Image (cartoon, rainbow, N blue to C red):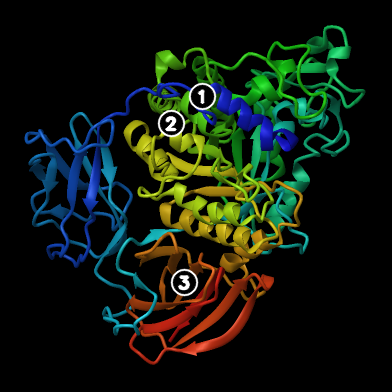
Amino acid sequence: MRYAMIALGVLMFALAACGGAGGGGSGGGLNLPPAAPSLSISTQPAGAQPATTFTTQPVVELRDGTGALVTNDSITQVTASIQTGTGTSGAALTGTATVTASSGVATFTGLSIDLAGTGYRLRFTATSFAAASSNAFNVGSSGGAVITPSAPPASNVTFNVNSQNNARAISRYIYGMNGAPFNGSRPANLTLTRSGGNRMTAYNWENNASNAGVDWYNQNDSYLGGGATPGGAVTPGISDAHTHNASIIVTVPLIGYVAADTSGGGDVNQTSNYLANRFKVSQAKKGAAFSNPPSTADNFVYQDEFIYFLKQSFPGAATNPNKTIFYSLDNEPDLWASTHPRLRGDATTGGNPPGTAGNGSVPTYAEMLTRTKDYADAIKDVESNAIVFGPVNYGWLGMVNFQGASDAGTHGDFLNYYLAQLAAAESSYGHRLVDVLDIHWYPEAGANNSSGNWTRVTADSTDANVVAARLQAPRSLWDPTYTEDSWIAQYSTLGPVRLLPRLQDKINANYPGTKMAITEYYYGGGDHISGGIAQADALGIFGREGLFAATLWKLGSTNHSFIYGGFEMFRNYDAANGSFGNTSIEATNPDVAGYSVYASVDAGNPDRMVLVVINKTNQSRTAGIAVTHTAQFNVAEVYQLTSANSQPQRVSDMNITLTNAFQYTMPANSVTTLVLKP
């Protein structure tokens, strides 16, 4: 995290790097390399019963690098298969599994799957086109016959929920926060925390010295605590998370140097030859026997020895699903040149006053790849079951060109390069190096406030125009029809951002099987209902879209009370750790600008369904809700988050008198959790 510099410094740095985006500029801005042709699923498979033809057969389109339909292609063959690791083991896909496109469209017929199961996905491949995977769907039903719902009463909007379609396990790690409170503070019942930020880039695990770079005068100090005990700045957080049945992401420095001392005294550049006298060389591998405690008499700090220390201190933590230690490859290396200039060749600029950017050398793609391979391999050599996160990009331009790296023109899109190179490295190393594609996402979307001043949604502002932009901002995580007001949409994507599908497309094309994480994000408005709505909306999207992990980083000067409320609508709606289900299911919504709806069940328990419905309008609205499911529901517990209170409030239960259908009146600007029971 950039602490004080993020709100303005990084934004201006990013705008400068993208060729004047934000004020006219010239030409097309970023000059991005053309995207690869790809397959796009226009009709998802649905209506599947064992050994019975799907009632809705998939339709796949051939799209060129601009996203346009390739209408002159009537020769490419598209092949469907069951995606590895989904559905029931041993299941077979039958029917016409390979079809030839007609005017760029491949229409499948007669497809069926022989075995019942949940979470099936079809994978579509074609020569010269990036593959595509379908939404998750079930074959057959569990818990009894599927009940067709009654028609709900006429309402302002109708939500259709269907447990038989798009079933997908929700990762428990999406409900996280950097420095999560496990001391009884809000929000309760979080599942993941992270030890990250700029201080961790030069963290010395042997003596807990750190240097936050320009965030605090480029000074070595003891800010992180821990005394002289090895790992003392990290291990208490691990113990606290594990005590509360939560996991943690621990940062492993990659930059090549760590702070040697906790002496303070301001900028290390006041010391002659400061790299030799105020830092120690950080190496991926020791190349000798580990010791615990480590030797502090030499000039080196070994990161594989750090992993060994943690493995000895927390045995089994790499494989315990509820109390995991994950490993992150540093923090925002695409900003090292500005955040840690003393370690990137700049001995004079940045950090005074705190937050002032430095002007060091930007890592190249090649350097970042080498550091990634060296340190990830060091981690896996010690802990073969470790799950490693990288590259931990700070934001958009980091993903696109690594903040203007000198070899960006040679290699093209950074994430495509990163994933493809790591896929190739797996063969030579004999194992995966990076398991999770990790980025940070502080939306650049915003609006002119009532005074005419441009304001990002990440600010504390409760101006009506900024609030309106904040309420829509989570749509850029997924929505192919939504174009936010930002320099990204104007100069880079030239339209919708659709962040998570965009990342998944890159993974599918370059390194299938890689998970996704957003380990810093923030939507602003911490003490306003709009902040709570945006937070809840983001959590619902994370679960539905298959994100593996997410950890909020709090910005601004608010108490974040409504953001906590947004978390609690999924993790503590009843003040007793009541939670959203662990499996996302289909929930359709015809008006995504005005409303959101997310639906879940618990695997193996058809008698409980939890919905989260969001009203983003300034007036109360009725929602007609129809539920296709294997159990009949007769009552709905109702919990609301409104502007009147930042904590979820239980209101009267609703009796469901129709067959799995009812009408609910959503308060203006609200989040509601509905717990459906027989």
One can see residue 14 in this view: yes
Report helix, strand or loop for mark 2.
helix
Circles 1 and 2 in contact, beta carbons < 8 Å: yes
Q: Nearer the viewer, mark 2 or mark 3?
A: 2
Please provide percent x and percent y for residue 73.
10, 34
Q: Nearer the viewer, mark 3 or mark 1?
A: 1
- Which residue does the numbered mark 3 point to in the structure image? 611
Please provide percent x and percent y for residue 77.
11, 37
Give the Cα distance between marks 1 and 2. Answer: 8 Å
Mark 1 nearby-residue class (10 Å; few <14, some 14–19, many ≥20) = many
Name the foreground residue: 150 vs 84.
Answer: 150
* Vertical order, 170 against 213 (above or below): below
What amino acid is labelled 3 in the image? Answer: Leu
Badge 3 or badge 1: first in the primary sequence: 1
Circles 2 and 3 in contact, beta carbons < 8 Å: no
Please provide percent x and percent y for residue 290.
70, 26
* Vertical order, 670 against 392 (above or below): below
Badge 2 or badge 3: first in the primary sequence: 2
What amino acid is labelled 1 in the image? Answer: Cys
Mark 2 nearby-residue class (10 Å; few <14, some 14–19, many ≥20) = many
What amino acid is labelled 2 in the image? Answer: Ser
Badge 1 or badge 2: first in the primary sequence: 1
- Which residue does the numbered mark 1 point to in the structure image? 18
- Which residue does the numbered mark 2 point to in the structure image? 492
Report helix, strand or loop for mark 3.
strand
Q: Is residue 606 left or right of residue 231?
A: left
The N terminus is located in which quarter? top right
Instruction: Tell me what residue is drawn at x 54 percent, y 68 percent.
Output: 618
Please provide percent x and percent y for residue 196.
68, 38
Q: Is residue 397 left or right of residue 203?
A: left
The C terminus is located in which quarter? bottom left
Instruction: Tell me what residue is drawn at x 41 percent, y 60 percent.
Output: 592
